[in-house]
Image (tube, helix red, strand yellow):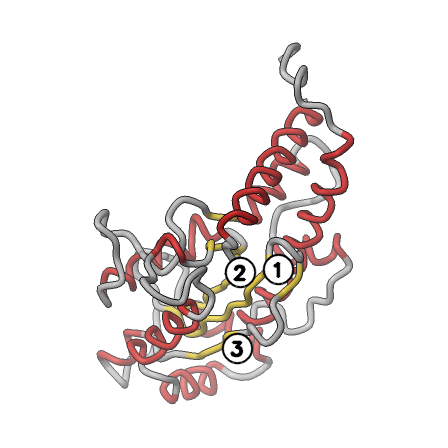
Amino acid sequence: MLLIIIECNILFVQIRKWRCQINSQKICVFDLETDGCNPEVCSPVQIAAVIVDPIKLEVVPDSEFNICLKPEALQDNPKYAYDDSDVLDFHAKVKGTTKAEVLKSWKKYQKQEQAWKMFVSYLQMYHTRSVKKNCFSAPIAAGYNINRFDLPIINRLSQKYKNVNKENKTDIFYPRDVLDIMNVIFYWFENNNELKNYTLDNLRDYMGLSKENAHDALKDVQDTAEILIRFMKLFRSLSPKIKFRNAFNNV
């Protein structure tokens, strides 16, 4: 069964490779750090991204994006204190500082609308064409656990700032594909005991990546991009050895 799953994943990535070669579609690995755990209501306090070239299998030079933005709660009420939330504790531990300092820094960040426009402009730089840009020329969205968390927030902000398609979904990314690396990891490891769980930190340990500055959005996208590239290289090295014609006869 594991072999079948691996073969399916290899075929999936090879098809994606072929499609990317035709369309020259770049991959945007992005991450949001937020002021809460519920993607339906929380606000991003940091957006980071890098662009992966799916042909060269490398991060595009100088493609890093990183911006901190003021959460909506503080824009609406500068005295908002997050008294009922553990989020400040989490960010204070990550930053090695105090909750008061975290809150103080958030109040100084860019306004959400300005930061959002900068992120949209950044993505525009990596469309497949320089004129008549639309969602079909946009980069493919990629990240870790983005289907459950980051993309719902992106959709909500896209609706707020009118960056949506006819289906009222975000138009800042290519609409037909999403690369959630967590799904790839799950299917790869689900039938063995090599991973204790599917957190990005645990995967860092497995891959030999440093956890210094973990949960900073830029560090997270750099590591996620590295993991994605490693898997794509692995898939491409294995694919010539797999014969698909009779692969499903005994399924």
Q: Which one is in front in this view, the residue at disc 2 or the one at disc 3?
A: 2
Nearest to the observer: residue 171 or residue 20: 20
Q: Mark 3 = which residue?
A: 92
Q: Picture quarter containing residue 183?
A: top right
Q: Position of residue 251 (x, y in %)?
A: 62, 13
Identify which amino acid the numbered label 2 is placed on: Val
Residue ID at (74%, 37%): 193
Nearest to the observer: residue 84 or residue 71: 71
Badge 3, how many Cα within 10 Å: few under 14, some, many 20+?
some
Horizontal side of residue 91 vs 113, given as left or right: right
Mark positioned earlier in the residue sequence (2 or 3): 2
Above or below 82: residue 26: above
Q: Are marks 2 and 1 in contact (CB under 8 Å)?
A: yes
Residue ID at (24%, 60%): 159
Above or below 133: residue 105: below
The CA span between labels 2 and 3 is: 25 Å
The CA span between labels 1 and 3 is: 26 Å
Mark positioned earlier in the residue sequence (2 or 1): 2
Q: Are marks 2 and 3 in contact (CB under 8 Å)?
A: no
Helix, strand or loop under label 2:
strand
Q: Mark 1 = which residue?
A: 225
